[in-house]
Amino acid sequence: EPEVTQTPSHQVTQMGQEVILRCVPISNHLYFYWYRQILGQKVEFLVSFYNNEISEKSEIFDDQFSVERPDGSNFTLKIRSTKLEDSAMYFCASGSNILAKNIQYFGAGTRLSVL
Amino acid sequence: SQKIEQNSEALNIQEGKTATLTCNYTNYSPAYLQWYRQDPGRGPVFLLLIRENEKEKRKERLKVTFDTTLKQSLFHITASQPADSATYLCALDSDTGGFKTIFGAGTRLFVKA
């Protein structure tokens, strides 16, 4: 069964460093998302991406964050100058088509630890 | 602002009973509502989607209702099993018209054998 793949599973970084979280969505999907979940809290929307551009972003997704789909398979989230409060689980998700709008398939997540 | 409320207290039930979880929302006019399951340390898994013109949706032991007047959805698991123990998330799309999904905080379900 096709699945969303995220790497690495755990990323440890020093405060102020840049990190890139990687995702390989399901191959025929068109809609891509990033979420974060701080330990013990709810899943929070960061950004959605469709047709090679950002469709929607939340207040959390400020200039520190960027997304890119550099080729036909990868979808990345870059966090510049990480802060302690960026420590969280980051989930990538993808969705297939407008008729199944926003049914999303999630990856296993990347746990980001900022020290 | 748009808000989704799920019972933050854990729900403990006995195996074989029906679990009922509630999702209430305010300041939304969603065209549809989704339910996901999340296990500890894992990503959410899609379970069911119900549209505003549907009163009820079923999938195996799962049933979802959607009352747009009450602004409420109920999620039922019949003949519950210990393997159903997880956190169940309600999700709605933002009214902004883009692709933005807002998740509730979830309700933790424990099914005891």
Image (cartoon, rainbow, N blue to C red):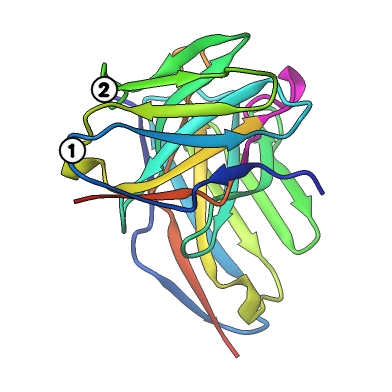
Which residue is found at the position 49% from the left and 53% from the top?
Answer: A9
- The residue nearer to you, when weighing A6 against B15, is A6
Residue A83 numbered tag: 1
What's the amino acid at mark 1? Lys
* Residue B11, picture quadrant: bottom left
Residue depicted at 19% across the width and 51% down the height = A115
SS for dot 2:
loop
Q: Which mark is residue B6?
A: none
Q: Are marks 2 and 1 in contact (CB under 8 Å)?
A: yes
Give the magenta-colored segment's residue range: A95-106
Image quarter (top left, top right, bottom left or bottom right) of the N terminus of chain B: top left
Q: Is residue A10 above or below residue A104?
A: below
Residue A64's label in the rendered image is: 2
Residue A112 is a magenta residue: no
Residue B32 in the image: above or below residue B20: above
Residue A6, compared with residue A55, is above or below; it is below
| Badge 2 or badge 1: first in the primary sequence | 2
Identify the element where label 1 is drawn. Answer: loop
Chain of the residue under the numbered disc 2 shown in the image: A
Query: How far apart, in angstroms, are the residues tagged by discs 2 and 1?
Result: 10 Å
